[in-house]
Amino acid sequence: MANGLHFRTTRAEINRAALQHNAGIIRGLAGAASVLGVVKADAYGHGMISAAQAIAGQVDAFAVAFLDEALVLRSAGFNQPIVLLEGCFSAAELPICAHHNLQPVVHEQSQLDAILTSRLIHPLAVWLKVDTGMHRLGWAPDQVRRVYKELNASPQVGSVTLMSHYANSGDNAHPLNQQQEQQFYDLTAETRLTDHLSLANSAALVSASRDYEQFDRHWVRTGITLYGISPNPDQPVSSELKPVMRLVAPVIALRDISAGECVGYGSCWVAERDSLIATLAIGYADGYPRHCPNGTPVFINGQRAPLAGRVSMDMITVDVTDLGQVKVGDEAELWGPELSVHEIARHAGTISYELVTRVSARVPRVEI
């Protein structure tokens, strides 16, 4: 908006102190490991530049999904190494990576060929991704030794970090975890890479059953936990971590309705008693999930109130009959410290990652 003014008070409050606090907790958990702070997808919807500023002193490098995101960080003045988790999509990106000290992941043959045939002003630090069981990106284990040798022999490559990704890191007991670890460490022995490794993500780092010492000399990748959200809703992270985002919207109307009357599109909520309905200025265009059903909680004036009626583009309606005095201008928390984003995600049939990353650009991020 012009001059940065925001007349609409719907907002996502971003608690910078909580973000810094969480980064400090994670730094402590990581021990001797290096920390890769993941700020892709606009820092999981929290605002990439402000988030990177908050955690810069606690992480050793940043990670983003692709080159465009990395260049936003560089243009904002960040000098730390930046890892491109999807690597480069074309050979034309490699000179830019060399110029800006960006570190691409190499996960398939065309990326390898582009590096081996390039002529760069500086050698690249690259991350070699092995598929140990996720089956999304990466080289099959029997190909890794060959690829590593080619990279290690290339004058275009300065260093190689071997990485993989747990498919079930949030489930400590899943049998694939041990299989993936075994494959990964077998490959470290074959390649003789012992100091440039990355296997642990947020879920693995905060897992209560993990031996943190196994990550010494590793890079640990921390994303969602930086923002105070557990990677697994059934296994809460340390109570010391604090939610960073608080999504807020004001009450813009109150309406008394009689028993038997309907509210919202499709008349999908019917009053079973005389009721007071509050309309809030937030909807699916703001990122509030359209699939939240009747009964999804909203936090108003220190109490919970249930969603009453279908989520529309710009508004939701809430039954505040039992809340006592509610007035136009009162503010509601949609998720945050008083109302877990995991709980709202369960009602919506999705995950917390989707909710925070889909808060739309028309909702200002306001640092508090």
Image (cartoon, rainbow, N blue to C red):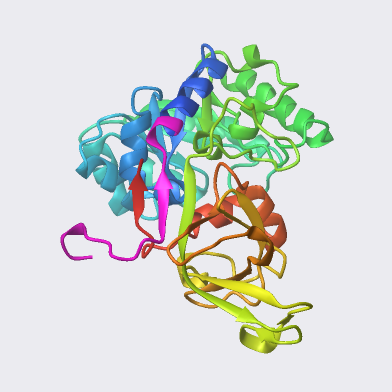
Residue occupying the point 40% across, 55% down:
89
Q: Is residue 4 magenta?
A: yes
Residue occupying the point 34% across, 65% down:
8
Q: Is residue 260 above or below residue 365?
A: below
Q: Is residue 307 above or below residue 197?
A: below
216 left or right of 253 in image = right
Inspect this view and state whether residue 196 appears: no
Q: Is residue 128 above or below residue 254?
A: above
Inspect this view and state whether residue 149 appears: yes
Q: Is residue 271 magenta?
A: no
Percent x, y of residue 88: 39, 49
Residue occupying the point 66% across, 77% down:
309
* Residue farthest to the left, as pictured: 3
Where, quadrant-wise, is the N terminus in this rendering? Answer: bottom left
198 left or right of 6 in image = right
Percent x, y of residue 358: 49, 60
Residue occupying the point 36% across, 65% down:
362
Percent x, y of residue 276: 63, 73
Magenta highlight range: 1-18
In the depicted view, which residue is nearer to us: 166 or 203?
Answer: 203
Where, quadrant-wise, is the C terminus in this rendering? Answer: top left
